[in-house]
């Protein structure tokens, strides 16, 4: 199963966002770590205190945010946006139409971007 690790500020804040997109909690390992899954994809939510958040040898400190993102395919972009917006999620871009369909960028509770994508009919 493909796995993406997302650094989050608070796992408890992140979980409702991913649940609104159809992900289910697979495992919770203490407050700073959870695994959610949907449609053959696991996302490892790594909060402060996990090994993924430790300072690197270079001195850099891994943190949430950025522009790399997962893409969650949805049947109805407007309905998906309404579900996440009802939970207070930040919408980074309104729907954008392209040759392959429509997309919008939203952010989880830690600022990690997630692209919601509705394929063209």
Image (spheres, grey):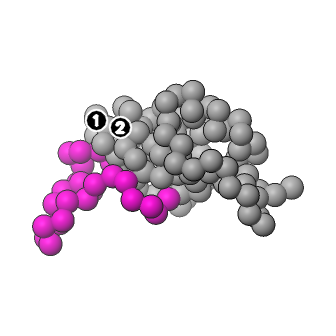
113, above or below 21, in the image:
below
Span highlighted in magenta in the image: 44-69
Q: Check the picture and name the quadrant holding the N terminus.
A: bottom right
Classify mark 2: residues with Cα within 10 Å, few (<14), some (14-19) or many (20+). Answer: many
Residue situated in front as seen by the camera: 58 or 100: 100
Measured as percent of width and height from the top left, residue 16 is found at: 48, 31
Q: How many marks?
A: 2
97, above or below 81, in the image:
below
Q: Which residue lies furthest to the top in this view?
A: 86
Q: Is mark 2 on a helix, strand or loop?
A: helix
Judge from the rendering whether residue 47 lies leftward or rightward of residue 4; answer left or right.
left
Q: Mark 2 points at which residue?
A: 11
Which is nearer the N-term, disc 1 or disc 2?
A: 2
Instruction: Assess whether residue 48 is covered by the magenta stretch.
Output: yes
Q: Name the residue under label 1.
A: 30
Residue 5, picture quadrant: bottom left
Instruction: Assess whether residue 67 is covered by the magenta stretch.
Output: yes
Judge from the rendering whether residue 73 lies leftward or rightward of residue 53; answer left or right.
right
Residue 41 at least partly seen: no
């Amino acid at each position: 199963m493909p796995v993406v690790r997302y650094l989050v500020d608070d796992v408890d804040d992140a979980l409702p966002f991913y649940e609104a997109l159809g992900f289910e909690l697979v495992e919770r390992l203490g407050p700073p770590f959870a695994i959610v899954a949907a449609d053959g994809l696991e996302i490892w939510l790594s909060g402060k205190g996990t090994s993924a958040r430790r300072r690197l040898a270079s001195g850099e400190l891994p943190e949430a945010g950025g522009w790399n993102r997962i893409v969650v395919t949805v049947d109805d972009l407007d309905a998906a946006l309404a579900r996440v917006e009802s939970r207070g999620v930040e919408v980074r871009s309104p729907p954008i139409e392209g040759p392959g369909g429509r997309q919008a960028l939203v952010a989880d509770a830690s600022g990690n971007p997630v692209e919601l994508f509705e394929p063209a009919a």
